[in-house]
Image (tube, rainbow, N blue to C red):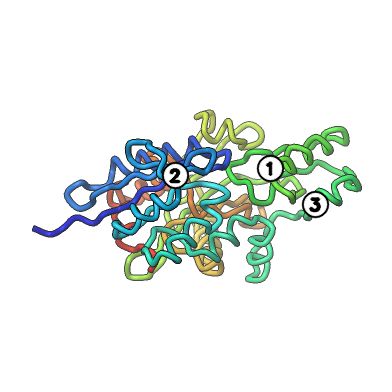
Amino acid sequence: MTARTRVAVIGGGQSCEHEVSLGSAAAVAAALDPATYDVVPLTIGRDGTWHDRGMRPIGLSGAAQVLRGCDVAFPLVHGPRGEDGALAALCELGGLPYVGSGVGPGAIAMDKWVTKLVAGAIGLATTPGHLVTRATAATERWTHPVVVKPVAAGSSRGVTLADGPDALAPALDAALALDSRALVEDVVVGREVDVAVLRRVDGSMVASPALEIVVDGLFDYDLKYGGGADLRVPARLEEVDAKALEDAALATYDALGCSGVARIDFFLTDDGPVLNEVNTVPGMTEHSQVPRMFAAAGLAYPDLLDELVRGAHR
């Protein structure tokens, strides 16, 4: 009898996406084929304390012991201290293969400003904007409608549409409450379309069908996780637009050096795709955007997870 692969599924974390991460971790743990995988749940509390499958606090040293007995880690901690390369670094130091992008790509993609610089360097259009810090926020002046967001908070928390002069200061306060830096970006007129990219076990990259987000207003945290958005997959696109989005998604993923699966978010304008941001640890319940996109291409949720675990970063 072939031994099952022991997979540490890590959820929770200290970011504002704690509950979302728990949902992803629970869904992945339930969907991994029990004939092939022995799932070992690990949860990071809001205070940073690690817990075992019985939710007993075991601390980092205890978690290290659990991880030492596993064959691969599947980190599903969204946002800071997870998606930003922190858990990838822990696995790297412990010599444990893990699902997803490495330390560098995770850190770069989490930083929306640096992501824009990388995209611009390979000729991709990005949302026009500039960087604001806590030291420079007081001198910021409103001249036209802008979207203000934290540079590396994730999950649309602290994202505000400042459509008038009086809205700018509160928007900056909300963003800078979550991060030491904020992005002030122009409002882009276009369709919100996402494409997921998966690096297969053989190293090849494959893009999913595009998904369109149809909302009335800003696609904020409440709409993203409250079910109020209309998600259309596959998106109804002209062939030339679908090809442009796929090419831009693959180029972005490749330039950042991503592994596993990542979701690349765009605005589709009259001039073509405009990169918004990259998520290297996207939501991973069966009904999340990425699994739905690959399901539209015929790759079922358990098969997607199997592909990710077998292609774990080594």
- x, y percent for residue 212: 52, 43
Q: Could you say which disc has been placed on residue 178 in the image? A: 1
Residue assigned mark 3: 132
How busy is the neighbourhood of tag 2: few (under 14 within 10 Å), some, or many (20 plus)?
many
- x, y percent for residue 51: 40, 41
254 versus 295 height, above or below: below
Depth check, front residue: 307 or 208: 307
**Residue at left offset 23%, top offset 49%:** 38
Identify which amino acid the numbered label 1 is placed on. Leu
Q: CA distance from mark 1 to mark 3?
A: 13 Å
Q: Is residue 233 visible?
A: no
Foreground: disc 1 or disc 3: 1
Q: CA distance from mark 2 to mark 1?
A: 23 Å
Residue assigned mark 2: 50
Which numbered disc flags the more N-terminal residue, 1 or 3? 3
**Residue at left offset 39%, top offset 46%:** 291
